[in-house]
Image (cartoon, rainbow, N blue to C red):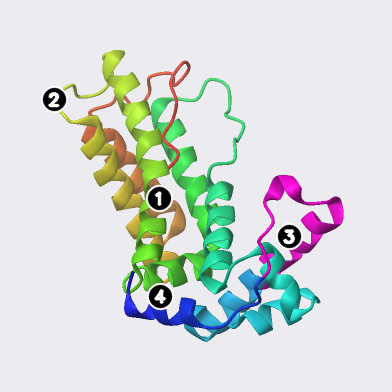
Amino acid sequence: MTASTRARRAAPSVDVPKRADDELTPRGARTKAALLAAARAVFERDGFLNARVTDIAEQAGVAHGTFYTYFHDKDDIFAAVVRTIDDDFHEPAPRPAGETLYEAIHHANCRYYETYAGRGRMMGILEQVATFDDDMRSLRRDVRRRFVERSERAIRRWQDAGLADPTVDPHYAASALGSMVDRSVYLWLVLGEPHDKDIALDTLSRLWVNALQLPPDHPARLTESPRL
């Protein structure tokens, strides 16, 4: 744990046991959801370091002490907001019938871009906080691991089906190709690097196909496209 984390957690808090989700009443669930929405708004407005529990409670319209019924501290609710956003990236999406491998990969890249576009501020804050906080660095790795594992499963299936280059390691291929997409989208949507969205996403998708030596026009049925 870093010094900054220790300092934040040494701050006084209200001594109320945090309730688990399965212990919440419908009203309690609504209050927790309001706190999560308020926290995201405050973090996006003030950044992680300047955000305060008091501001989050005020934004949610609840008493300061109510916050501690649902979350231990600012770190806890920040992690909860990030996990909520991470779940958004993994929501199942309908896939068009008859799509090709290129189209499946391109669809996944487009969906990642669009999901990121509405959450870029929080993703940028997470990247920043992960550079100096051990717990948040671990959280960032957890977010990344879900993408890598899904892509790795897809690559293994493509290899088993004789569609992908059998000489590449599926884990490191998934890691490298996922990093390419993730970092590119971060540069475009967080750092504001100018780009043509259509050309950029088409290029990323073709690089995926070329790197794995996939037949781009092969039907994608019975395979799982990577959720980048």
The residue segment tinted magenta is: 16-38
| Residue that label 3 marks | 33
Mark closer to the chain start, 2 or 3: 3
Q: Nearer the viewer, residue 40 or 77?
A: 77
Secondary element type, mark 3: helix
Mark closer to the chain start, 4 or 2: 4
Instruction: Name the mark on residue 158.
Output: none
- Rounded to the nearest angstrom, the CA distance separating label 1 from label 2 is 27 Å
Tell me which corner region of the image, top left, top right, bottom left or bottom right, holds residue 53. bottom right
- Rounded to the nearest angstrom, the CA distance separating label 4 from label 2 is 43 Å
Q: Amino acid at mark 3?
A: Ala
Q: Is residue 20 magenta?
A: yes
Where does the C terminus fall, quadrant-wise? top left
**Looking at the picture, does residue 90 appear above or below residue 40?**
above
Mark closer to the chain start, 1 or 3: 3
The residue carrying pointer 3 sits among few (fewer than 14), some (14 to 19) or many (20 or more) residues within 10 Å by Cα, namely: some
Main SS type for the magenta part?
helix
Secondary element type, mark 2: loop
Residue 131 visible here? yes
- Rounded to the nearest angstrom, the CA distance separating label 4 from label 3 is 25 Å
Instruction: Name the mark on residue 5.
Output: 4
Q: Are marks 1 and 3 in contact (CB under 8 Å)?
A: no
Tell me which corner region of the image, top left, top right, bottom left or bottom right, holds residue 186. bottom left
Secondary element type, mark 1: helix
Q: Amino acid at mark 1?
A: Asp
